[in-house]
Image: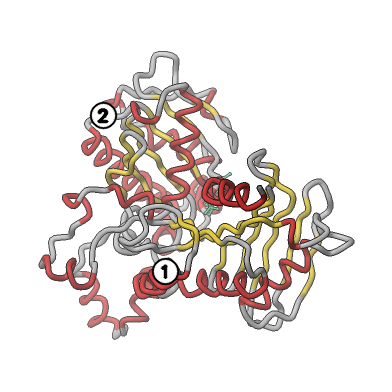
Amino acid sequence: MLVLVLNCGSSSVKYQLLDMPSQTLLAKGLIERIGLKDAALTHAPAGQQRVVRTVSIQNHSDAIRLVLKTLIDPMVGMIQGLDQIKAVGHRVAHGGEMFTHSVVLTEKNLVALEKCSGLAPLHNPANLAGINACLRWMPGVPQVAVFDTAFHQSIPPSAYLYGLPYELYEQDKLRKYGFHGTSHKYVSMRVSEMMGRPLENLKLITCHLGNGASVTAIEGGRSRETSMGFTPLDGLVMGTRCGTLDPALIPYLMEKYGFNTSEVNEFLNKKCGVLGLSGVSSDFRDIETQAGYGNYRARIALDVFVHSVQKYIGSSAAVLDGADALIFTAGLGENSPSMRQAICSRLTYLGLELDPEKNLVCGQEADISTEGSRCRVLVVPTNEELMIAMDTYGLTEQTLTNMER
Ligand code: AMP
């Protein structure tokens, strides 16, 4: 059964076409700079040369139509007709408290989803535009929403409530939500398979360390605590995001530098993190290179990042009362042995011992701890698109099979 996975950002659409349940990737691609003169399509059919084209794309509806046309293109497409696509899975940033797991988008669910948009004004409108475009161009094909927040809905009130008047939670749903849920869920499922132990019996600390970064405490397959909060700005110091701050700093910054609310938001999201600390880049590869040349600010940016990850691992271990495994995923977690080594250097209290040889692995699944390590350390490449395809297949396969009978 063919499943199309869509990840619509404010000016981009990423897509993958997968055959499920075999998990075979048939094609993937990206439309960038939607609405600009130099919008571009990159299409990569499996096993063939990728195609890059400048295109005229005004909005998400045009973009989705181009994706569909490309998939059935006689030269570069992988399918003969759109009727071969049996379901579409959409990445949706925010599901609020209404969505605790992935759902098929019925009319009722769409109304509920519209209501969540206010919680993620930068992300959800683009996700909704993608959904509406699919409803237009692929009428009758089941659409599934997979939420970044849903996995964290198992976090208890003691962990998701802020020290704010309770009415603000009741009226406006101001609380911790957490993000990267699809990634944390996917790697936890892989770890259970890799360790040959049921998820129900495992305490896991998953570190999604990419440009955006978060740490999650998972017990019995359920998220118990996570570092991101009401928005993805909270928690770890990240590529360009500041992470946790003394909240009093925000009015201070606004007064001192004359920032209005959108300017301070832009500043904290785009100009801070290891970019602001190092003055070099938001990319850890550049920062590691500069630190190697003796650049003090690059060195201190790495040290602040490591300290921040160690602190959140510590708080996760406290919430879980120990851990069976620590997991590294996403760009940095999967590919930087030096970062993993630095982070693990002060985790001996977990009974954790990294194997320096095994730790050299990049971008593939591996257990990188010593035989005797009480807490396993694993590298697991994340695959959010596959997780979306798995949920989409799981939610629609039965209905489609019944319809075909
Ligand atoms: P992601 O957001 O998951 O795509 O991760 C992107 C980040 O991963 C980049 O900003 C880099 O800082 C980091 N990264 C990717 N590959 C490496 C590598 N080989 N060494 C260090 N950092 C890396």
Counting residues from the start of the chain, the first of labels 2 and 1 encountered is 1
Residue 385 drawn above or below residue 162: above
What residue is shown with label 1? 108
Q: Is residue 7 visible?
A: yes
At label 2, counting other C-alpha atoms closer than 10 Å, the crowd grade (few under 14, some 14-19, many 20 or more) is some
Residue 147 drawn above or below residue 260: above
At 79% from the left and 61% from the top, the residue drawn is 81
Residue 29 is situated, as x and y percent measured from the top left of the image, at 70, 59
Q: Nearer the viewer, residue 301 or 98?
A: 98
Say which mark, if any, is on residue 322: 2
At label 1, counting other C-alpha atoms closer than 10 Å, the crowd grade (few under 14, some 14-19, many 20 or more) is few
Left or right side of 324 for 7: right
Q: Is residue 331 visible?
A: no
Q: Secondary structure at mark 2?
A: loop
Location of residue 326 by image quarter: top left
Ligand 1 within 8 Å of disc 2? The answer is no
